[in-house]
Image (cartoon, helix red, strand yellow):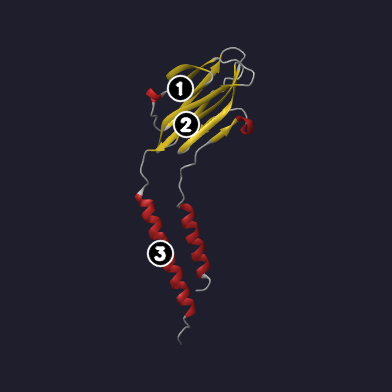
Amino acid sequence: MRQMTPVLAAACAAFFALQGSAQAGPLGYDEASDGDVGGTLQLGIGENTVAGELSGYDPDSFVFVVPEGGSLRVISLDIQPAPGQPGQTVGFSLGRGDYEERIASTSIAVPSSGALFSASLPLSAGSYYLSQGLSGLATAQYEFTLEVEATTPVPVPPTLALLLGGGLCAAAVGRARRTARTPAAG
């Protein structure tokens, strides 16, 4: 029975490890450290940020995925001209899929800070794109914040499973210890 206690402890540890949340945390993407924005960015629940530098030669468009159980509620932007650069106008488009269907577009003056596409939000789980571009040779530094909220409440069955599983593991370990301490009759 003494060999059963480590096996039981390992089973309990595996149970608790598998009960962790499947939702990814918020994304923090910065071109300075992560490379030029590209590919598909997987957003998480919370404030996701995408920062970089934009120019007429480098439009920095990207595809992002709002996770299942999430809803994109706010897209905000802070964009500033690079040092020594004049202010410009920058155009933005928001759409579905991999540049398949445009939802909305707008142009703003640089520098600027605030919400974008408020009338088109919230967006449910799925794949979307943001494209941006400056006209001319100017350069600007930007940071998008994409706020994703959970749309489903914290599920009760996994919580109950965690509590029941924890109680059963504790009871089993306690019983194994008591049985190991009790001398065999005979």
Q: CA distance from mark 3 to mark 2?
A: 41 Å
Label 3 vs 2, first from the N-terminus: 2
Instruction: List the residue tagged with mark 2.
Output: 146
Residue 144: where, in percent of width, then height? Answer: 51, 28
What's the residue at 37%, 23% (across, down)? 119
Label 3 vs 1, first from the N-terminus: 1
Residue furthest bottom as drawn: 186
Q: Residues within 10 Å of mark 1 (few under 14, many from 20)?
A: many
In the depicted structure, whether residue 81 falls above or below residue 71: above
Label 3: state its secondary structure: helix
Instruction: List the residue tagged with mark 1.
Output: 94
Q: Is residue 37 left or right of residue 123?
A: right
Instruction: List the residue tagged with mark 3.
Output: 168
User: Which mark, by number, is residue 103?
Assistant: none
Q: CA distance from mark 3 to mark 1?
A: 50 Å
Q: Residues within 10 Å of mark 3 (few under 14, many from 20)?
A: few
